[in-house]
Amino acid sequence: MEILIWSIVILLMLAGLVGSVVPLLPGTTLILIGALLQKWLLPDTITWMAVGWIIAIWVLSVLADLGC
């Protein structure tokens, strides 16, 4: 089961990286979803500090999109 969770999280994060370049994919949102999914299902693998930084970067990217 853990391999399945890791696979889903890695796919979401890779799709998020691609979404940073491709205009129609929500890159930072996919990365945020991957991080939250990993924290929820595998709580010992990522800290709340790392999730907090990912959320902060997500908020900045959303504000930058709204400002354009």
Image (spheres, rainbow, N blue to C red):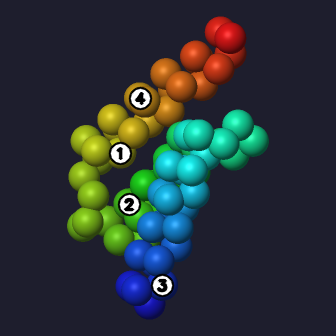
Find numbered disc 3 in the image and state the secondary structure of the residue it sits on: helix
Whole-number angstrom distance, CA of label 1 to CA of label 3: 21 Å
Q: Amino acid at mark 1?
A: Val
Residue shown at 25% from the left, 41% from the top = 49
Whole-number angstrom distance, CA of label 1 to CA of label 2: 8 Å
Lower sequence index among marks 2 and 3? 3
Label 1: how many Cα within 10 Å (few below 14, some 14–19, many 20+): some
32 sits left or right of 63 in the view: left
Label 4: how many Cα within 10 Å (few below 14, some 14–19, many 20+): few
The disc label shown at residue 4, or none: 3
Residue shown at 57% from the left, 50% from the top = 18
Quarter holding the N terminus is: bottom left
Q: Nearer the viewer's eye, disc 2 or disc 3?
A: 3
Lower sequence index among marks 4 and 1? 1
Find numbered disc 4 in the image and state the secondary structure of the residue it sits on: helix
Q: Amino acid at mark 4?
A: Ala
Whole-number angstrom distance, CA of label 2 to CA of label 4: 16 Å
Find numbered disc 2 in the image and state the secondary structure of the residue it sits on: helix
Report which residue position mark 1 lands on. 51
Residue shown at 54% from the left, 25% from the top = 61
Query: Which residue of the protein is positioned furthest toward the right in this rendering?
Result: 24
Q: Is residue 31 above or below residue 37?
A: above
Q: Amino acid at mark 3?
A: Leu
The image quarter in which residue 3 lies: bottom left
The disc label shown at residue 2, or none: none
Lower sequence index among marks 3 and 4? 3
Query: Which residue of the protein is positioned furthest toward the front in this rendering?
Result: 21
Find numbered disc 1 in the image and state the secondary structure of the residue it sits on: helix
Report which residue position mark 4 lands on. 56
Residue shown at 31% from the left, 65% from the top = 43
Q: Nearer the viewer's eye, disc 2 or disc 4?
A: 4
Residue 16 at x, y = what percent?
A: 55, 50
